[in-house]
Image: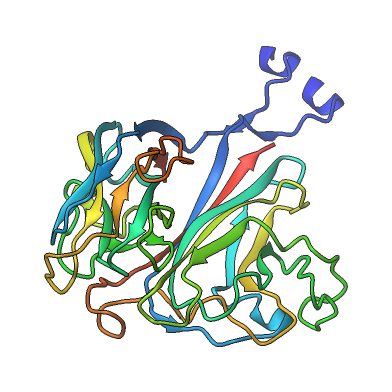
Amino acid sequence: MARQLFNFPETSASGGIINIIRYKDSTRRTISPQSGAAGRSALLNNFTFSKQQGAEASYILVTGLIPGLGMDNYPHIGMCCTIDQIGYGQTATDSRAPDHPQGMAGGGIYYGGVNTGSNNEGTTFIIHKSFQTFNLDAGNHRLDIGWNANSNVRPLTYQNPNGTSDNDRHHQCGTHILIYEIAR
Amino acid sequence: MARKVLYVPEVTVQDKLVNVTRFRNDTRVNLPNSGNYTMFSGSFTKLYDANTSWILMEGMIPGGKNYSDQCGVFAMLDGANTNNDTPRHHGVYYSGTNAGQPWDRFILYVHRIIDNTDSAQELNAGSRTWSVGWYPRNGSTGQRPFENMNPNSTDDARNQQCGSIMAIYEYLY
């Protein structure tokens, strides 16, 4: 009764990590140059996950590693990591990201490597992005990782390189990403 | 009744985190040319069996001076499948510059998820060891990701002593 009088939720997180969704991808693929919001899902496309609790009870943190080869363009091309296509920035009026505020998709992901298109040179993407300021309800959501630039560019040539198509010292490499649901 | 008076919720969600074991290595090492080498390792205790919990290896190793553009880096627990093109080569990668001056810097980053898509032996409960190193797929013996790990002022007087870290997270499914 007291719980109901004071609007205490019937289910609550005890603190800590409520759930973790694991994403693995070890398929080598060629990454095409993209301009504007068309590049938003080039590295992770519409990965659907379920959030167990409401916006008031939990938030999302995404961490991960993406291996690549050949940094094809100059490093700053507007990397983004976002949920439900919120805030793509540069071309926010793109029909695939209508009316969203600019900028929120950026940050929390960065990459480094040799500034060359050579297929021998590695490019490492590190993801560590908190969505604590996003209001995400319980239910299904989508995660997308890519970029949004004002020209036709790409930050790498190949994702998940291997020893068959690339240099034979490689084993098959793989992308590993975690989606944490954390109690507020 | 007491639960309701004291506002304890009827259901709480169990934290998925079981345990974290942390490691550091602050020793500068001139890495050898090798066809199979472990550059950073440690031991920990996994509390639950392979069906109950999974592992995240998360850490980084700073390096200096380029050498091999790629060399088959791995991150693994004992019991992993060590054949070519196996999961121990996923979730681990390095990159840096394309030059061998003392100020040319590298990051080897580890974010490997070890779960029920990997070998069950890699997730057994008990005393376990983890390792990070390299093993070129083509069998070449003259490889290394960079010339030294954990660079310091020996390499460049502006450096402080750099260090490697690793955290082994055990999570419930």
The image shows residue B136 at horizontal and vertical percentages of 19, 67
- In the image, A145 versus A112, the foreground residue is A112
Viewed as shown, does residue A1 lie left or right of A58? right
Query: Quick one: which residue is furthest to the front in this view?
Result: B157
Residue B54, position as x, y percentages in the image: 35, 46
Which quarter of the rendered picture does the N terminus of chain B lie within?
top right
Instruction: Specify the quadrant of the image occupied by residue A88.
Output: bottom right
B160 or A173: nearer the viewer:
B160
**x 81%, y 84%: residue:** A95
Q: Is residue B113 visible?
A: no
> At which x and y percent is residue A12?
67, 34
Which of the 4 quarters of the picture holds residue A175? bottom left
Q: Nearer the viewer, residue A29 or B121?
A: A29
| Residue at 88% over, 73% down | A99
Q: Residue at x 25, y 66 (%)?
A: B71
The correct choice, above or below, for B40 with respect to A37 in the image is above
Q: Which residue is located at x 40 percent, y 68 percent?
A: B98
Colouring mode (rainbow / by chain / secondary structure / one colour): rainbow
Where residue A87 appears, as percent x and y from the top left, is: 78, 66
Give left or right: position of A99 versus A128.
Answer: right
Report whether residue B164 is seen.
yes
Q: Is residue A43 above or below residue B88?
A: below
